[in-house]
C-alpha cells in the first residue's frame, strides 16, 4: 500500500512507549496498539506489573518489551527512551499514562504525600516528554505525545487535592509543550478520563457499591467507562488521522457536565 492509499487511522509500525503499561488503562492501551502492529515498550516502577502484560502481548503475536522506570527521575526517563530505541531503532509515540493518587483531606495531607503525587503525575509527564522530544528531534521525524490526565484535572477533586492539581498541570503542560514543539513536528495532546472501571481506581473513587452506582448515575450515559474506551482515542491521536490536532484535551467522562444542565 503506497503512502497515498495508506489507512490514516493505522498505527502499524509506530514504535510506542506506554508508561504505567502493565495494568488498567495502560495495559489496554499497550494491547490495542500491539494488536494493530505497533511495537510497544511498557514501563512501570514494578517488574511484576509488566511481565504478565509483556508475555500476553507476545503470545498474541505482538512485539513488546518492558522497562522498570521511576518517572520522577529524569535520567531514568532518558534511559527508558534509550532502551526503546535500542530494541526498535526509533520512537514514534509516547503515552504518559502513569499516575498515582492519595485520598486524604487537604488538612491531613503531609508534605511528602503532596510531593509524591505531584512528582509522579506532573514531573513524570514532563521528564518523559522531554526525553521523547529529544529523540524525535534527533530523528528529524517529528512524533506524538499523548498525556493521560483526568476529569479531576478539569473539575478538581475534593478527596484527592494533590491528584487534581497535578492532573490540571498536565492539561496546561500539554498546551505549553504543543506550542513549543509544534515547529519540530511534535504533536502533544491530552485525554482526561472520567470514571473508568479499573481495580486500581475502585478503592479511591467508589469504595462501596452504593457510591459506585451513584457515580454511574451521574453520567449522561449512566455507566462507567471501559479501559478500551480510553485506548481507542489514543489510537486516533497517534494516527495520521489526527495530524492537525495538537494542544487539545479530549474529555472522556460519559457526559458528566451534561447532567448539570437545565
Image (spheres, rainbow, N blue to C red):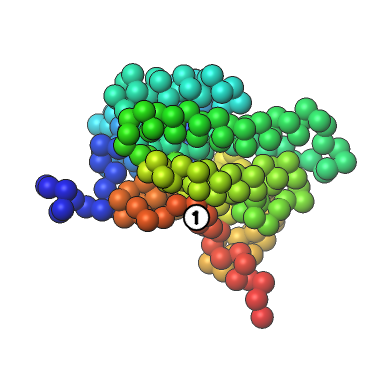
Q: Can you tell which quarter of the image residue 40 is in? A: top left
Give the farthest residue toward the right. Answer: 107
Give the farthest residue toward the front. Answer: 183
**Mark 1 burial class by Cα count in 10 Å: few <14, some 14-19, many 20+:** some
Label 1, secondary structure: give it: loop
In the rendered structure, the answer to whether residue 180 lies left or right of residue 157 reads: left
Q: Can you tell which quarter of the image residue 111 is in? A: top right
Q: Residue at x 52, y 54 (%)?
A: 249
Q: Residue at x 67, y 61 (%)?
A: 214
Q: Residue 8: image x %, image y %?
A: 26, 53
Residue 134's place in the image compared with 7, above or below, is: above
Closer to us: 45 or 171: 171
Closer to us: 234 or 209: 234
Q: Is residue 41 visible?
A: no
Give the farthest residue toward the left. Answer: 1
Q: Residue 25: image x %, image y %?
A: 49, 42
Q: Residue 185: image x %, image y %?
A: 37, 43
Quadrant in which the C terminus appears: bottom right
Q: Report the residue marked by disc 1.
A: 248
Residue 155's place in the image compared with 53, above or below, is: below
Q: Residue 238: image x %, image y %?
A: 37, 46
Q: Is residue 106 visible?
A: yes
Closer to us: 165 or 107: 165
Q: Residue at x 82, y 32 (%)?
A: 110
Q: Residue at x 33, y 30 (%)?
A: 139
Amino acid at each position: 500500500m503506497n503512502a497515498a492509499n495508506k489507512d490514516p487511522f493505522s498505527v502499524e509500525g509506530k514504535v510506542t512507549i506506554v508508561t504505567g503499561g502493565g495494568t488498567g488503562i495502560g495495559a489496554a492501551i499497550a494491547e490495542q496498539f500491539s494488536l494493530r502492529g505497533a511495537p510497544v515498550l511498557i514501563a512501570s516502577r514494578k517488574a511484576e506489573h509488566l511481565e504478565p502484560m509483556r508475555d500476553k502481548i507476545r503470545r498474541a503475536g505482538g512485539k513488546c518489551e518492558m522497562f522498570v522506570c521511576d518517572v520522577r527521575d529524569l535520567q531514568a526517563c532518558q534511559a527508558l527512551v534509550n532502551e526503546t530505541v535500542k530494541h526498535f531503532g526509533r520512537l514514534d509515540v509516547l503515552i504518559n499514562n502513569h499516575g498515582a493518587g492519595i485520598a486524604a483531606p487537604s488538612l491531613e495531607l503531609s508534605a511528602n504525600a503532596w510531593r509524591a503525587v505531584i512528582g509522579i503525575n506532573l514531573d513524570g509527564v514532563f521528564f518523559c516528554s522531554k526525553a521523547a522530544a529529544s529523540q524525535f528531534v534527533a530523528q528529524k521525524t517529528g512524533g506524538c505525545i499523548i498525556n493521560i490526565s483526568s476529569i479531576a484535572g478539569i473539575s478538581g477533586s475534593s478527596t484527592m487535592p494533590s491528584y487534581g492539581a497535578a492532573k490540571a498541570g498536565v492539561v496546561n503542560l500539554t498546551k505549553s509543550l504543543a506550542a513549543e514543539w509544534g515547529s519540530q513536528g511534535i504533536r502533544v495532546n491530552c485525554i482526561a478520563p472520567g470514571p473508568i472501571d479499573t481495580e486500581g481506581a475502585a478503592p479511591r473513587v467508589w469504595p462501596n457499591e452504593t457510591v459506585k452506582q451513584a457515580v454511574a448515575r451521574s453520567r449522561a450515559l449512566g455507566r462507567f467507562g471501559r479501559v478500551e474506551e480510553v485506548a481507542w482515542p489514543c489510537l486516533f491521536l497517534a494516527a495520521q488521522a489526527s495530524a492537525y490536532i495538537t494542544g487539545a484535551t479530549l474529555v472522556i467522562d460519559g457526559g458528566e457536565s451534561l447532567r448539570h444542565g437545565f
